[in-house]
Amino acid sequence: MNRSNDRPKTKRTSISAALNIVFAVIILVVIISFVISVNFVIKSERREYAVREAQMALTTLSNSLSSNISNYSELSRLIMIDDSLVTFLRADASTVDFGVINDARYGIMNILNVKEGVDCVLVFRNDMIMLATDRAAYAYESASMQTDLWKESIYEGKGRAVVGLNSYGVASRKDGLPVITIGRAIYDMYTQKRTGILLMNISSDVLSRILRQGSYHDVCLVGTNGEYLAGNKEYMKYYSADYAGNEILNRNVLTPGGNKLVSGCLVEGLPIVMLYVSAYGSESIPYGIIQVLIILMLVFMAVAGFAGAYVSRNITMPIMQLSGSMEKNKKSGELKKLDVEMPYSELNLLKGDYNDMIDHVNELIDTLVDKEKILRRAELRVLQEQIKPHFLYNSLETIGFLAFDAGADNVHEALETLGSFYRNFLSKGNRVITFGREVQIVRDYLSLQKLRYGDIIEDVYDIAPETEDFIVPKLILQPLVENSIYHGIRLKGEKGTIKIVSRLDDDILYVIVEDTGVGMSKEQIQKILSKDRNDRDEEKDSSFGLWGTIERIRMYCNDDDVVKISSEVGEYTSISFAIRSVPAVSGVEEDEEIV
């Protein structure tokens, strides 16, 4: 009793505490969100700043590298038109001696005197007679020279400069230092026939000098083959083939000195990958945005505190009063309306909804009482109606006894079968019966049909014992069997077989009704299985029981695809369906013997 009296007070305390917890959680979430947001903004801004700085540096460096390589490309073009080199290329192989080669070499070296950084120039005639400005510094791959693979990209340039690495694999420096190679296909200016290939090797010192002049201390230049070219060699550990693309790729890496940004891309038109490593500095921290966020957080916390006090004073307490009135109403044991004044229209609306609910509940109680009376009267009527089938059974028993007494055994047997058929058919008015009883209905029905049609009908049953207690809608087999007789076997004009098969698998009853009648066309099957009743108009007269049974099975299983029909015209028709197990239905039992 004391616990019941304290209940409104407990509710009031719980709601207030819950509201306080809610507001405290909101404030905590706001603080955590603020910290996360500030951290995210700072990191994002620092990253964006580092990305912009890296993009600017890489763009500038790429332009510088391209410009320098372009100057060397122009120098290679001058070498191609040197008279002594042209004489070397045009000379017959039998006339090419040391003097011709030496003249061409000196002509090339005179042109190279105007430009530093050229490590070596190699010229190959079509017959692979070669000259080199610094032959002793290189080791040559004779096997590679004899193949055409290294020439393909140069030939595709059609005389334009094509930049590669390390003499395209036909020669390499003995000291192992990398070189940038400008390759050109040489064409005779008069005949326009290709006379040879020029390879100009540029020392990697040129790249180092460009980096020093631009103060690129945080840059590493790598060949597309993964070979170090120039710059900070320690950054080679960050290189991967992913950076060898035209778009700048940015990645965060964790170093002993903290997080750093590694940016890289391919120099346009050159086999050189630039790696730029930069640290996240404090230059880009948005202090103005952080100050605004702090002010907004403080304002929100103040508003949240005021809202919490207002809700507690003006909403929570009136709700507690309303709850107390409801509790008193419940203790009284009567469903009465509340008669308490509320300070706000919303709470008055809540009180009004409660009072409306009380009225509705009282109306429902009155309605249920009336329905219970009607149900009792209906049950009495059902009991009275059961007298009629009892009278039918007793009458059939009496006529059967008279027939048996008169020696009409066939008439007695027919009456016995008919009585069994109606006893199972009516099934005390139940809508569902066991599958075993449903099969018995079909057996009795076919026994009666055999009395009429003789031996033209043969029935075969393959009924699994475990399916006999399965609950199914009443009268789902007899209409299918009747359809098999009247629209299948009779129309064929010869003896036919009706076979019924049942199996139980995973609480699903699978049933097949098959006959050897005239069969059905695909159009007939489509109309019978159609969910649109308008499609069945032509079939209603001839297959009313069939499509009506299909519709009942669909409704029982709540599945439009539960029934399937397969047939071959002139051969057979097979109707199969599957029914999932449902909870046992009360009232489904065997009829008592009627006397």
Image: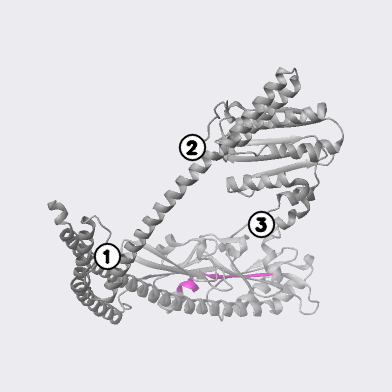
Amino acid at dot 2? Ser
Looking at the picture, how far across and down is residue 519, in whole percent?
Answer: 81, 41
Secondary-structure class at tag 1: loop
Looking at the picture, how far across and down is residue 154, in whole percent?
Answer: 68, 68
Q: Which of 517 and 493 is in front in this view?
A: 493
Q: Which numbered dot is residue 144?
A: 3
Residue drawn where x is 42% and y is 53% of the image: 370
Residue drawn where x is 28% and y is 76% of the image: 345
The figure's colour scheme reads one colour
What's the distance in space between the residues labelled 2 and 1, CA to CA?
41 Å
Amino acid at dot 1? Lys
Secondary-structure class at tag 3: helix
Q: Which numbered dot is residue 586?
A: 2
Q: Nearer the viewer, mark 2 or mark 1?
A: 1
In the image as oriented, which residue stretches furthest toward the right? Answer: 493
Q: Quadrant of residue 144 in the image?
A: bottom right
Q: Which of 390 and 108 is in front in this view?
A: 390
- Decide which of tag 1 and tag 3 comes sooner along the chain: 3
Examine the rendering and report whether any part of residue 323 can be seen. Answer: yes
* Start-end of magenta stretch: 197-208
Quadrant of the frame with the C terminus: top right
Residue 495 is covered by the magenta coloring: no
What's the distance in space between the residues labelled 1 and 3, CA to CA?
104 Å
